[in-house]
Image (spheres, rainbow, N blue to C red):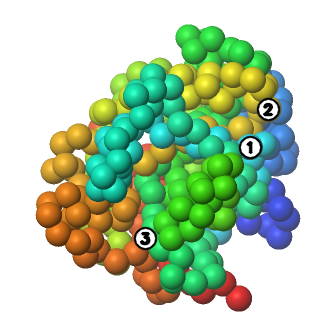
Amino acid sequence: MKLATLKDGTRDGTLLVVSKDLKRAQKADHIAPTLRAALDDWNYVQPLLVELSLDLEPNRSNRAFDLDPRQLMAPLPRASQFADGSAYIIHAELIMRSQKRELPADMKKEPLMYQGCSDPLLGPCDDVAIGSEDQGIDLEMELGVITGDVPMGVDKDKAGEQIRLLVLLNDVSLRALVPADLAKGFGFFHSKPPSSFAPVAVTPDELGDAWDGRRAHGAVRAWVNGELLGEPDAGTDMQFDFPRLVAHAAKTRPLSAGTIVGSGTVSNRDRKSGAGCLFERRAEEILKGGKAKTPFLKFGDRMRIEMLGPDGKTVFGAIDQAIVQAT
């Protein structure tokens, strides 16, 4: 099942069910007004949404309409919280090596995680408004899961039972602001503005064999101004799987339904797959004995992020957006 949120002038939009090919949609607000409300009552609502979504496939519904991704908000425009991890160790290794720093020994034993911006979250075609180009604007291709209610201290082998949906996101980062954030000792804040999300959130079964209950397998591709930046496989080199990340987020607190847990930048040890963000590409340039040549994003630049399934078809739809100056 694929779910989306229609822009309607409200903060949380209107819940939609979407066809597998992402071409048609139908309002589901008679079942649950918003995705947030659906997640709060998932056991009751989920079967009804599945039944409604089945009507879209043989084109039985006379209430369906053609879907334009520009009509959409983020699938979950306001999350209970956004806990973003760093599951791909090669990403951190590259960055630290380029800065002549050693990877902390415990980083391979326990995931890094920070509390990101959970409200607002941007839709797939919304502009990304940034105050200044000097802030080092970067994109990060990530996958994430949306949870149900997760009890505090949940075991990692049980945490996967609370994964309701998967999402694809662009974790926008302001690299020039990171050092000042970290120097304060409290972690990322100003360096992490709102993230952007692909058109639909999907139930794990939509990925078929590409979902093994812990990881989503398949290439995530990112383009900047039409040039391919990278296409790493999300299921490869993921040190900490999603149940492990969910359990880590719930170590000392319960997670409310509608919590998003992110994977961190998707990245592979085989560098032929390219970079998961501009910072990685710049790190590679430094490690090759030179200076970083790749610029960060400028106003007017466009980003596109998409994941294809084993059948070669888009899973979540595409994030396709521009960087603009905030007013």
Residue at image point 49% right, 66% down: 175
Q: Are marks 1 and 2 in contact (CB under 8 Å)?
A: yes
Mark number, residue 303:
3
Q: Amino acid at mark 2?
A: Ser
Q: Residues within 10 Å of mark 1 (few under 14, many from 20)?
A: some
> Where, by quadrant of the figure, is residue 49 drawn?
top right
Residue hosting label 1: 81
Q: Whole-Å distance between the Cαs marked 1 and 2?
A: 8 Å
Q: Residue at x 38, y 45 (%)?
A: 92
Dots 2, 3 in contact, CB < 8 A = no
Residue matched to label 2: 256
| Quarter of the picture holding the N terminus | top right
In the picture, the quarter occupied by the C terminus is: bottom right
Q: Residues within 10 Å of mark 3 (few under 14, many from 20)?
A: many
Q: Is residue 258 visible?
A: yes
Q: Secondary structure at mark 1?
A: strand
Marks 1 and 2, the one that precedes in the sequence: 1
Closer-to-camera residue (313/136): 136
What SS does tag 2 mark? loop
Instruction: Pinpoint residue 172: horizontal percent, then vertical percent.
Output: 54, 63
From the image, state whether disc 1 or disc 3 is nearer to you: 1
For label 3, the SS is strand
Nearer to the camera, 279 or 120: 279
